[in-house]
Image (cartoon, rainbow, N blue to C red):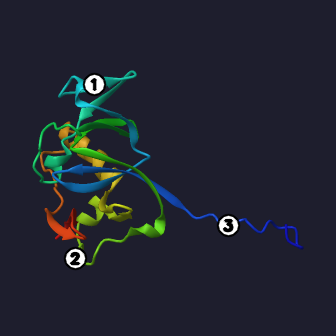
């Protein structure tokens, strides 16, 4: 304690955000941890359609197709990510879950200037973490994809721009073109 009665070790509150880092078509994406309800293996899900987990129905959302990427099917690291927001529940098949990261907001970089249009609503920024870079997906856009796939929106599906493979420090990362 200092002379003025304050503890010296008190640090200013630094806002942190949590993301689940996943891979689809060898590209890394970050899903807000606020969305995540659970993870299942494909064997645990036993279904390619709507999943019922603890009394909630999770409709399938093909995120690979929504992003314009190849769906690689099930592999040894494949998982089903259960997400929910505003009463809308979805299950998303991913190639791999890299883990949950907690980082300061300063590690979320804004989108580069070439993102000038609708894609600013699709991506939240570039997430820097120990293993590299992931593209942050906007939670509202992601859940909106489920509404589109269920036919709640007229047949036009907007898709974000194709992501290119870019080598960086010897690792493959999905970065926007």
Q: Secondary structure at mark 3?
A: loop
Measuring 27% from the left and 59% from the top, which residue is drawn there?
122
Residue 76, relative to residue 55: is it above or below?
below
Which of labels 2 and 1 is toward the front? Answer: 1
The residue that appears at 24% across and 64% down in the rendered structure is 119
* Residue appearing at x 12%, y 45% in the figure: 155
Question: Closest to the observer: 112 or 24?
Answer: 24
Task: Report the residue that reaches farthest toward the right.
Answer: 3
Crowding at mark 2 (Cα within 10 Å: few <14, some 14-19, many 20+): few
Cα–Cα gap, marks 3 and 2: 37 Å
Between the C-alphas of marks 3 and 1, the distance is: 43 Å
Residue assigned mark 1? 44
N-terminal label among 2 and 1 = 1
| In the displayed structure image, the side of residue 61 where residue 17 appears, left or right | right
Nearer to the camera, 82 or 140: 82
Which quadrant holds the C terminus? bottom left
Indicate left or right for 73 with 27 as reference. Answer: left
Q: Which residue is mark 2?
A: 114
Residue with the mark numbered 3: 11
Q: How many marks?
A: 3
Q: Residues within 10 Å of mark 3 (few under 14, many from 20)?
A: few
Residue located at (17% from left, 68% from top) = 166
């Amino acid at each position: 304690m200092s002379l003025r009665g304050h503890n010296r070790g008190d640090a200013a509150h630094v806002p942190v955000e949590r993301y689940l880092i996943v891979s689809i078509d060898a590209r890394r994406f970050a899903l807000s941890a606020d969305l995540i309800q659970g993870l299942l293996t494909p064997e645990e899900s036993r279904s390619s359609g709507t999943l019922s987990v603890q009394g909630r129905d999770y409709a399938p959302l093909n995120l690979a197709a929504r992003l314009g990427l190849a769906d690689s099917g099930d592999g040894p690291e494949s998982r089903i990510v259960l997400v929910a927001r505003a009463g809308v529940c979805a299950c998303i098949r991913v190639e791999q879950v890299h883990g949950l990261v907690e980082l300061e907001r300063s590690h979320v970089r804004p989108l580069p200037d070439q993102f000038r249009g609708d894609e600013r609503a699709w991506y939240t920024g570039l997430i820097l973490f120990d293993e590299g870079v992931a593209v942050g997906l906007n939670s509202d856009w992601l859940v909106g994809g489920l509404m589109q796939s269920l036919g709640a929106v007229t047949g036009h599906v907007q898709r974000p721009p194709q992501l290119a493979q870019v080598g960086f420090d010897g690792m493959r990362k999905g970065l926007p073109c």
